[in-house]
Image (tube, rainbow, N blue to C red):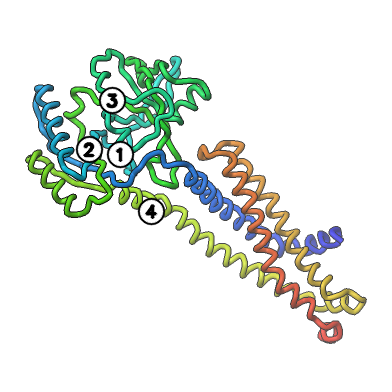
Amino acid sequence: MFKHLFKLIWNKKKQNFLLMSEILVSFLVIFAVFTLIVYYYHNYKKPMGLDYKDVWVINYSNSYQTKNTDSLNLFYGMLVQTIKSLPQVKDVSFTSENTPFTHNQNTGGVTVNNKKMDGVNWYTVDNNYKDVLNMQLLDGRWFNKGDDVVKDRLIVINSDFKEKLYGNGSAIGKIIGDGDNKNRMKVIGVVEAIKIMGDYANTNIGLYQRTDTGSFRWLGKMMVKVTPDADAAFEGRLYKTIANYMKNSDVEIEHLSDNRTNINYFTLVPMIVLLIVACFLIINVALGLFGVLWYNINKRRGEIGLRRAVGATGSSVSAQLVNESMILATLSLILGSFFAIQFPLLNVFNLPASVYIIALFLSIIFIYLLVLVCSFYPGKQAAAIYPAVALHEE
């Protein structure tokens, strides 16, 4: 049976080659689409690692400048007390520019056991940062006021950083060097990794360093945790309070929830574009496959009529055309799978191998279903050909 089908396919190899090429290209595009979908879903299932609701980000510029460090710390200390005096404010935290759900990043390297590791996200935060974002402490502790008198440079790392460096072992008390390995830093805590680029992005390796006495000279953001009943009227009151205190500053208030929505849209744009392209390609392939099979039926009416005349049933004729299409799809998928399997083997785009494997199986199933649907109706039409009419036409 299959030997006969392969012989029929080989006799029309030029025509079938074009059809196989269409199926191959469709498979590769579908594989890319499913890879993105599986990757985004894989990331979406991970916990956010922070509580973004009711957290506002205050951007300020032209901040208070003085060479006296005590005056600088006093100025911003009074600002925090003024903001906390408002009834809807729970907590306030100063932070570097790379707040969650923004495209601002501060990446650098660290040195561990005399080996440099790049791609580390550095965050400069204060003692209240963890509480404002409700981050989960997994091991050790967070920064506190007692660290003011500690000589060591203390840091907190996230779970991704800890797993990459120490696996299942403890990171507390470990010494890590900076990019140039000039300054030594001591790990005092491990927090859960947060998805700073939105729901569909992966977590990143993160390192948190504490603000020092000179940090207020360049910091330009603070995060404010407010109560759920904080409305636009309170936002206006908060803005006036900060603007009146920092008279020479340009103040702007953002909501983390709005920033999360915006960055999610930005993340989904490539997948939406790819989905649109894939839909057009699938429609073209489906129409092409349907048309080729329809054309084959009309060209093979004599052959089909002869088969029916010698006793072939309509279902067997229909099954022959469907099986031919499935064999063509199988040949295309074998070649396409060879290219697709190179992605996890070569670790392309640094994605987990499971993402590629799942996307590969989903793509294969999708192509088989597409070919089956497109070949079913032409096969049914072939089964309806009457042998006398077909032979008379010949």
Residue 11, compared with residue 354, is above or below; it is: below
**Whole-number angstrom distance, CA of label 4 to CA of label 3:** 32 Å
Q: Secondary structure at mark 4?
A: helix
Q: Amino acid at mark 1?
A: Thr
User: Which residue is disc 4 drawn over?
Assistant: 265
Crowding near the residue tagged with mark 4, few <14, some 14–19, many ≥20 C-alpha atoms within 10 Å: some
Between disc 4 and disc 3, the foreground one is 3
Query: What separation in Å lies between label 3 and label 1 (alpha carbons)?
Result: 15 Å
Asked if the residue under mark 2 is in contact with the one under mark 4, i.e. CB atoms within 8 Å, the reply is no
What residue did someone put label 3 on? 210
Residue 31 x %, y %: 58, 51
Q: Amino acid at mark 2?
A: Lys
Residue lying at 29% horizontally and 33% vertically, measured from the top left: 129
Residue type at the position of mark 3:
Arg
Relative horizontal placement of residue 248, taking residue 1 as reference (left or right): left
CB contact under 8 Å: marks 1 and 4: no
Which comes sooner in the sequence, label 4 or label 3? 3
Residue count near mark 2 (Cα–Cα under 10 Å), binned few <14, some 14–19, many ≥20: many
